[in-house]
Image: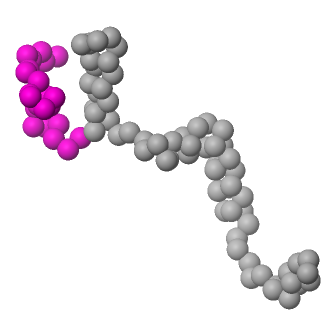
Amino acid sequence: MTIAIKTIGPRGQLLLSEKYAGQQVLIDETEPGVWTIKTGKFIPDNERWMWIAETQTQIDRAITWAEQHPPTETDLESLAGHIEK
């Protein structure tokens, strides 16, 4: 474990080690002035739905179905007979 004293710059920036350059970090403020900083890969908000357990189960079922049912050519004339006019 490394402990370091840093100064927050006039624009609110805190410089960490260069080895963290370009990485995403999660900053958890547990109380005013108390922060936990964690590096990681984070999921964009518009993709978060894919990581819900129920959704993952549905995606897995869909993939399994698609693997067991290869695509076939559609008979357009037969299909046209089922369309309401």
In the figure, is residue 54 to the left or right of 28?
Answer: right
Main SS, magenta residues: loop
- What residue is rendered at 56% in x and 45% in y? 50
Return the residue found at the far bottom. Answer: 77
- What residue is rendered at 9% in x and 28% in y? 10
Residue 27 lies in quadrant: top left
Vertical comparison of 55 with 68: above or below: above
Is 6 magenta? The answer is yes
Instruction: Judge by depth and name the residue closer to the eye, 84 or 39.
Output: 84
Residue 82 lies in quadrant: bottom right
Vertical comparison of 84 with 22: above or below: below
Q: Position of residue 64 (x, y in %)?
A: 68, 55
Q: Position of residue 16 (x, y in %)?
A: 13, 30
Q: Is residue 16 visible?
A: no
Instruction: Judge by depth and name the residue closer to the eye, 14 or 21.
Output: 14
Instruction: Judge by depth and name the residue closer to the eye, 13 or 50.
Output: 13
In the figure, is residue 79 to the left or right of 29?
Answer: right
Colouring mode (rainbow / by chain / secondary structure / one colour):
one colour
Instruction: Judge by depth and name the residue closer to the eye, 62 or 46.
Output: 46
Is 57 magenta? The answer is no
- What residue is rendered at 13% in x and 18% in y? 2
- What residue is rendered at 88% in x and 78% in y? 83
In the figure, is residue 10 to the left or right of 75?
Answer: left
* Magenta part of the chain: 1-23
Residue 14 lies in quadrant: top left
The quarter of the picture where the N terminus appears is: top left
